[in-house]
Image (tube, grey):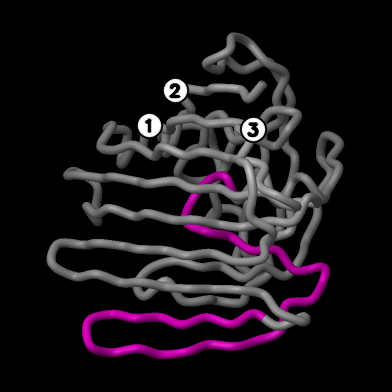
Amino acid sequence: MSTGARTLVRAGRYAIFANGVECGEERWTLEAVGDGLVVTGAQETAAPHPLPSRLEYRATLTPEWRVTGIELHWTVGAREIRALHHAEAGRWRARLEYGAESRSQEGDYPAVCEVEIPSHLSAMFVLAHRAFQLEGEHEFPVLRIGPPIMAVSPERMKLRCVATGTIMSPRGPVAARRYVASLPPRGEDEGYTFWADDDGLVLESFEGPEPERPWMRLVELTEGA
């Protein structure tokens, strides 16, 4: 990706919940840089979250919202994990460092494949490539990156649009769609649900397939010029 002047696209803050109790936040910034996009963010969680920690991340994307690289720094107590992921010539490569140990990963990254990072902003990347009508669904390969060592887990993901409505957001009521995300062959009962606006920005998410236990909620939003 080219370097150069940065132009703010959006910035925001999510409140994070565990078992219905607010216990952290995620602050993030999306910028246009040179010939692509850069997302930077940091999550902080505390008890009663099951895994109190701090996660800092930086992701690069093409103008078409295809992920080209991710850097992660995860701190859990005294443990630190650093992960560097990048795409090159249809391949996905990663270097993972934890303590004095390190390991590498490599695999295919075909054009139909998506990438899920430990942030709800991933949904915006995925939805940018797909159009949904009510009860419409898409299934696709996905590289899921996350704990315990921020490595890649190749999976298949299914997104299904289950409702439409008007949702409150930091900028007032907005039109939104509710989706259920699952990992076939596992059923939707093991997945989660979220509301996203017409740009794919997640406004609110819930643990499980029904909108009952809050997981994340967008509480601040700044739009670029």
Q: Nearer the viewer, residue 41 or 125?
A: 41
Residue located at (55% from left, 53% from top): 191
**Residue flagged by tag 2: what amino acid is it?**
Val
Find out whether the residues at labels 2 and 1 contact each other: C-beta distance under 8 Å. Answer: yes
Q: Position of residue 70 (x, y in %)?
A: 54, 64
**Residue flagged by tag 1: what amino acid is it?**
Ala
The residue tagged 2 is 219
Among the 4 quarters of the image, the one containing residue 73: bottom left
Q: Nearer the viewer, residue 32 or 123?
A: 32
Kindly report which numbered mark, 2 or 3, lies closer to the viewer in this rendering: 3
Residue located at (86% from left, 36% from top): 133
Residue located at (75% from left, 69% from top): 113
Quadrant in which the N terminus is drawn: bottom right
The residue tagged 1 is 15
The residue tagged 3 is 9
Residue 73 appears left or right of 134: left
Q: Of the two numbered discs 2 and 3 on the same chain, state the one appearing first in sequence.
A: 3
Q: Position of residue 83 (x, y in %)?
A: 42, 73
Q: Position of residue 163 (x, y in %)?
A: 72, 30
Q: Which secondary structure lies at badge 3?
A: strand
Quadrant in which the C terminus is drawn: top right
Q: Which secondary structure lies at badge 2?
A: strand
Spatial separation of the CA atoms under disc 2 and disc 3: 17 Å
The residue sitting at the top extreme is 172
Among the 4 quarters of the image, the one containing residue 171: top right
Q: Of the two numbered discs 2 and 1 on the same chain, state the one appearing first in sequence.
A: 1
**Residue flagged by tag 3: what amino acid is it?**
Val
Spatial separation of the CA atoms under disc 2 and disc 1: 7 Å
Q: Which secondary structure lies at badge 1?
A: strand
Among the 4 quarters of the image, the one containing residue 172: top right
Q: Which residues are magenta?
A: 92-121
